[in-house]
Amino acid sequence: MAEKETKNKPKDLIEAVPEEVENLVLDVPEIEKPVEKEKYESKKDTLSSWIPKTKLGISVKEGKEKDIDKILDKGKKILEPEIVDYLLSVESNLLLIGQAKGKFGGGKRRAWRQTQKKTKEGNILTFSTMVVVGDKNSHVGLGYGRAKETLPAREKALRHAKLSLTKIQRGFEDPADTAKSDPHTVPFKVEGKCGSVRITLLPAPRGTGLAVADECKKILKLAGIKDVYSRATGQTRTTFNLARACMDALSKTNKMIR
């Protein structure tokens, strides 16, 4: 019986020379990270196209005011968030003040707090959120925003956080560490309150970490505090009041008794 002829004959394999392999490897383009580059360029474009409307903004844009600490010490009010972006490189983070719907009395915590208003047309939804900003070098701010959608609420909270930026004082747990240039904790015992929440921050030695609630950790990290002890009383599950009480305690570090 005759063998069937195959229409597609197998092709001969040609091995590549080592020099050709090196050329192939060199021709591969490097993969860049476009996200970080786009964020930097967008921020640069917004600042370059910024038209200040206040005297402080004009002086900052012209280069007359270069230090934000002097602005805060003189008590000048910041009315434009671009001033903070122009003088500092701040980071932001959302606080989990809301709660998703779930079975058996609750679900997972989330950044958006949802409320409803009963009208003749039906239920009107509103979303609110809290944002904390800081440069991890004694500058921190907390903002609250509310809108009918999530993204406008976040933008309002971010703007309010930059406008309410404050400078805090950091210190050392051991007086012998004062020669070092890296303060790591609160300078002394401070207490803050909001509503029924009372929170006390205590100095802690190096390596202790942040012994506070998870949402307060976000605030202290952006403020540049690495080690702290804490004690809280009241309805601490109300994150809204807990965050404001923490900010109240940090603001009292400036009232050092001399």
Image (cartoon, rainbow, N blue to C red):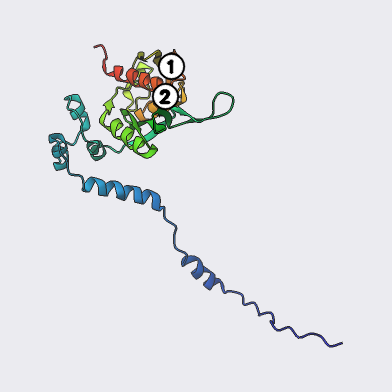
Q: Where is residue 43 in the image (x, y as percent from the top left)?
A: 29, 46
Estimate how packed mark 1 is, as few (under 14), some (14 to 19) or many (20 or more) residues with alpha carbons within 10 Å.
some
> On the rendered image, what quadrant is the N terminus found in?
bottom right
Q: Quadrant of residue 140?
A: top left
In this view, the mark in front (2 or 1): 2
Q: Element type at marker 2?
A: helix
Name which of mark 2 and mark 1 comes first in the sequence.
Answer: 2
Q: Nearer the viewer, residue 22 or 109?
A: 109
Marks 2,1: beta carbons within 8 A: yes
Instruction: Look at mark 2 in the image and give the residue it sits on.
Output: 216
Amino acid at pointer 1: Ser
Q: Where is residue 67 in the image (x, y as percent from the top left)?
A: 20, 33
Q: Spatial distance from mark 2 to mark 1, Cα to Cα?
A: 10 Å
Where is 66 relative to 22, above or below?
Answer: above
Indicate left or right for 160 with 124 as reference. Answer: left
Q: Position of residue 47 (x, y in %)?
A: 23, 45
Where is 91 relative to 175, above or below?
Answer: below
Tally of numbered tags: 2
Instruction: Look at mark 1 in the image and give the residue it sits on.
Output: 230
